[in-house]
Image: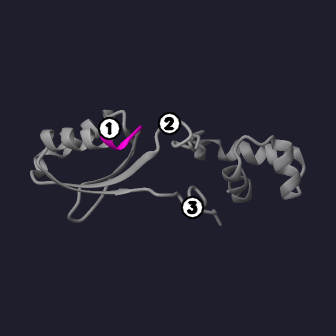
Amino acid sequence: MPYRIINELRGNGIRPLKAVAEKLGMPVTTAHSKMKKVRESIKGTLLLDFERLGYPERIFFIVSLKDKKDREKAAEYFHRCRHVNTLHKIDHSSDFLFEAVFRNAFECSTFIDEINACFRMKINYFKVIRPMKQEKFELR
């Protein structure tokens, strides 16, 4: 796998291929052929600055359902919820880990009240003060 190309694109995915090839010290044609090989690994997503987009409240939730029969229903609910940015099924004593974004604290509080009304659960949440490292894993 051409990991150097992937790592370079993760730093700035909108840079022209010519600039990437120059930085890596390879001909553009070589970079282009290597890019063809990794297209399936690239989802084409963007990293958003939620605060600049008007969503300064970014919260990570860990949810443990009291009734494990509700897992499928809860997964569907969180998957459809407009506030939920990422959703993960996790192991051990908890069921889900997800990130949600909100315009303000009231919107977040309303969301918490809504999910508590829908499901019996233990919920822990943590406000992101400042992202410190994001999408920086380097393939080797």
Task: Name the amino acid type tagged 1.
Answer: Glu
**Image point (9%, 51%), residue name:** 67
Residue 7 relative to residue 118: left or right: right
The image shows residue 3 at horizontal and vertical percentages of 69, 58
CA neighbours of label 2 inside 10 A, class few (<14), some (14 to 19), many (20+): few
Q: Is residue 60 magenta?
A: no
Q: Which residue is mark 2?
A: 54
Q: Which residue is mark 3?
A: 133
The image shows residue 76 at horizontal and vertical percentages of 26, 37
**Image point (42%, 48%), residue name:** 58
Residue 72 relative to residue 58: left or right: left
Task: Name the amino acid type tagged 3.
Answer: Lys
- The local secondary structure at tag 3 comes to loop
Quarter of the image for the C terminus: give it: bottom right
* Disc 2 to disc 1: CB gap under 8 Å: no
Report the predominant secondary structure element of the magenta stretch.
Answer: helix
- The local secondary structure at tag 1 comes to helix
Dot 2 or dot 3, earlier in sequence: 2
C-alpha distance separating marks 1 and 3: 26 Å
Residue 75 visible at all: no
Magenta residues (range): 103-107
